Amino acid sequence: MAITIEFPKEYGYVVMVLVSYAFLNMWMSLQVGNARKKYRVPYPNLYASEERNKDANLFNCVQRGHQNSLEFMPLFFALLLVSGLQYPLIVSGLGTLYIIGRFFYFKGYSSGIPDKRIKAGLMSFLSLFGLMICTALFGVTLVM
């Protein structure tokens, strides 16, 4: 049995949000690479050792900001793509807020003062929570 999915015209915005996050992720990757060179943290070390590197905290904050974004990326993509089928404009707005929050989360974390990430992290979390609600509502419409 074949299933046909009709995408709303506005779903293109959802796709553009996803691509925007891919660009943000690439930019964060470049920042980690630059920090690797600057703080002399060779591959394959994921994090710098404080015993061997006086700048370990600075590098680790950059790495951790990117790593945390990678940890949430699959959840963000799934919620964005699924809920966007029903609520493309709302979800595109929430996804854009999430990306802005992630950018400032990374900037705050990579400053070397991890507490600078908290306000932006809250913005990302609230946006993600909104996407969860939209996805749950979409699921309810499917079973009714």
Image (cartoon, grey):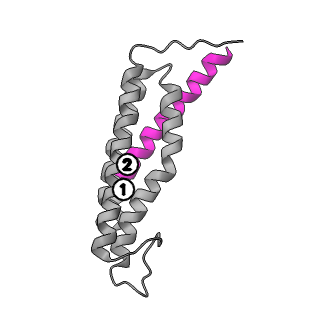
Magenta stretch prevailing secondary structure:
helix
| Pointer 1 residue | 29
Amino acid on which disc 2 is placed:
Asn
Q: How far from the left and from the top, in percent, is residue 79?
A: 52, 34
Image quarter for residue 115?
bottom left
Amino acid on which disc 1 is placed:
Ser
Horizontal arrangement in the rendering, residue 95 relative to residue 138 (left or right): left
Which sits in the foreground, 130 or 57? 57
Local packing at callout 2 (Cα closer than 10 Å; few below 14, some 14-19, many 20+) is some
| Pointer 2 residue | 25
Compared with 59, 81 (above or below) is above
Image quarter for residue 10?
top left
Horizontal arrangement in the rendering, residue 120 relative to residue 44 (left or right): left
State the mark number for residue 126.
none
Q: How far from the left and from the top, in percent, is residue 124?
A: 40, 45
Q: Which residues are magenta?
A: 118-144
Whether residue 102 is visible here, answered yes or no, is no
Q: Residue at x 37, y 57 (%)?
A: 118
Q: Are marks 1 and 2 in contact (CB under 8 Å)?
A: yes
